[in-house]
Amino acid sequence: MARKNYRTCVRMGNWNEDIFLEEEMMKDFLEKRDKGQLLIQRNRILIANLLRKTTLSVIEDGLIHYGDKVLIMNPDYTDPSGGQVVFGRLALAVTPEEMKAHMSNEIEVPCEVTAMPDVKPIGRNTFIILSLDENALGKTVRYGQNFGLATTAGFDHKMANAKIVIKHCHTNQALAANRKYSLRTYFGKECEVACHTHIDCYKTEKPLNHWVLCTGDPNDHSSIVLDRGNPLEKKMVPEQPVVNTDAPIINITGQNPFPLPYASKEENCNF
């Protein structure tokens, strides 16, 4: 079959339109690059924010307040029934879907949460205690009060860094870190987190429903107080300390939560 050969300088077809199209595509690319809107740039911004080191709130009175930055930890335990595949302390963390992580530089809601094995405070496992009452900022969080949790984007007569049970307001189910089921996430292997109350034969919550609102270490802002023991123990515990092994219950708001007025200790305790 006969074939015509042309030199590279010969222009054929819609050569003028093709040149303008390439120029427009290059201008659009350069504009997005300068504004940081390229997919790879947005993904790097999101990952950098999620993995950046954060500083937890350092408490002076041993209590948790609205506005405090805390790390929510599931303490280590051994399940007597067996089947446990993950050991050690786990930290509650936000886990965006891999596709959404590549497409956006912000966390989109709804967003899944998992329990990560690293308890060092970073962007994805640091939460702020929120209240729907604007005047509640800085006030003490009491047992039974509703509160919200937000990513960084104390209890009356109870020190921080103590075991609690966090319940969802609408379902009344407790937050649980299931160590028998692991998930492959964008950040590696982590544990499944769900709202389900696991109780034993004594009708009390099992260790997978226990969480700790960890605060920062005043001597090392990159770690948590529990890494070196509670420095406020001598200050907060009376001469005859009372040992309480039960995990008190507090509520966490879901979607469309209703604010509760600031009440006294008797109105907020659930025992």
Image: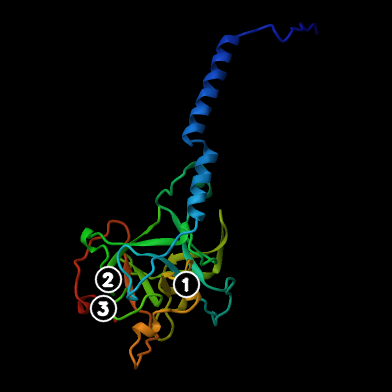
Instruction: Tell me the SS state at disc 1.
Output: strand
Q: CA distance from mark 1 to mark 2?
A: 22 Å
Instruction: Tell me the SS state at disc 2.
Output: loop
* Residue that carries the numbered disc 3 in the rendered image: 269
Residue type, mark 1 in image: Asn
Q: Give the quarter of the figure containing the C terminus.
A: bottom left
- Residue 72, can we see it? yes
- Residue 97, can we see it? no
Residue type, mark 2 in image: Thr
Q: Give the quarter of the figure containing the N terminus.
A: top right
Q: Compared to 119, does 97 lie above or below?
A: above
Q: Quadrant of residue 174?
A: bottom left
The colouring scheme, among rainbow, by chain, secondary structure or one colour, is rainbow
Counting residues from the start of the chain, the first of labels 3 and 2 encountered is 2
Residue type, mark 3 in image: Cys
* Residue that carries the numbered disc 1 in the rendered image: 74
Label 2 packing within 10 angstroms: few (<14), some (14-19), many (20+): some
